[in-house]
Image (tube, coloured by chain):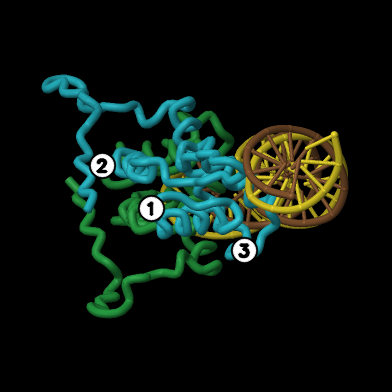
Chain colours: A green, B cyan, C yellow, D brown
DNA sequence: TACCTACATTGATGGCTGTCAATATTGGCG
DNA sequence: CGCCAATATTGACAGCCATCAATGTAGGTA
């Protein structure tokens, strides 16, 4: 089970920088909001859930269209957003496209919340 | 440091129900997406960051308007969304309104990701 | 009572987003 | 080569959202 090390990104200044971040800069916030934008849609959460559950390795689009009751282009669109957010990994094998969870991506998102 | 026990919600059927959740129902997904909708805005992330950093107890709106470079109504709007998402707690004291992190709310959001 | 301050609400507006139909692309197969 | 199947892309459209100016509300003070 993942225990989420949450190790700080190598900012080991041991003496004088306790005020770490001056409360999230504008750019930094914009960047981190992208991941949550990708997570802020019910259908995308369901996609992640299905793909994680079917951890037999990967899932193709055809298996994702039906349970969500969405058109194929819409599913493809959501998958693209999740891939661009770094949450999913796409692998084309022949005519099919297989999707799998990007390792550690969800943990990273959780880490953003923990470290604010 | 929060280590997030991640204990399953008591579904200890030891023999025949390994398919645990049928991959997030539509309603459940809609519900969980609400939290991430609230987190999917850079300015709201910055608000959370500022309020968490100033953990001297609570922060009033006047201290939040300036660093974000937003109008007062806009900040008030964002704060309302965060409160309604259960992420912040509002306490009116006289003319001022003080905001503080809802205890455990961020951990809960992280837990949603961990348990999908 | 009257006034000021801190915050919330309303209304309007421009921009983003989820959705689908239609079309394009790409790989396998005969 | 020609056709079909699986995905991706495009275009269009409705609905939501972040933002601000203007206004409302309520507590404190004189």
Compared with A11, B79 (above or below) is above
Can residue B64 be seen here? The reply is yes
Q: Residue at x 62, y 58 (%)?
A: B65
Q: Position of residue A41 (x, y in %)?
A: 52, 41
In the rendered structure, are the residues bearing label 3 and label 1 in contact, judged by CB atoms less than 8 Å apart? no
Compared with A49, A78 (above or below) is below
Q: Nearer the viewer, mark 1 or mark 2?
A: 1
Q: Chain of mark 2?
A: A
Q: Nearer the viewer, mark 3 or mark 1?
A: 3
Under circle 3, the secondary element is helix
Q: Are marks 3 and 1 on the same chain?
A: no
Q: Quadrant of the N terminus of chain A?
A: top left
Q: Residue at x 57, y 57 (%)?
A: B64
Disc 3 from disc 1: Cα separation: 23 Å
Number of residues whose C-alpha sits closer than 10 Å to that of mark 2, classed few (under 14), some (14–19) or many (20 or more): few
Q: Mark 1 or 2 closer to N-term?
A: 2
In the image, taking residue B86 as reference, residue D26 lies left or right, namely: right
Q: Residue at x 46, y 54 (%)?
A: B51
Q: Which residue is the site of mark 2?
A: A56
Q: Position of residue D26 (x, y in %)?
A: 67, 33
Disc 3 from disc 2: Cα separation: 50 Å
Q: Which residue is the site of mark 1?
A: A113
Q: Position of residue B24 (x, y in %)?
A: 39, 30
In the image, taking residue B21 as reference, residue B88 lies left or right, namely: right
Q: Position of residue B54 (x, y in %)?
A: 43, 58
Number of residues whose C-alpha sits closer than 10 Å to that of mark 3, classed few (under 14), some (14–19) or many (20 or more): few
Q: Which residue is the site of mark 3?
A: B66
Under circle 1, the secondary element is helix
């Amino acid at each position: 089970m993942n225990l989420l090390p949450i190790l700080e990104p190598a900012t080991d200044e041991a003496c004088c920088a306790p005020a770490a971040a001056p409360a999230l800069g504008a750019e930094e916030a914009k960047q981190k909001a992208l991941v949550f934008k990708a997570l802020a849609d019910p259908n995308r959460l369901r996609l992640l859930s299905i793909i994680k559950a079917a951890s037999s390795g990967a899932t193709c689009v055809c298996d994702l269209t039906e349970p969500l009751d969405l058109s194929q282009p819409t599913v493809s669109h959501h998958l693209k957003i999740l891939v661009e957010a770094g949450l999913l990994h796409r692998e084309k094998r022949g005519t099919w496209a297989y999707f799998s969870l990007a390792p550690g991506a969800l943990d990273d998102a959780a880490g953003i919340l923990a470290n604010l």
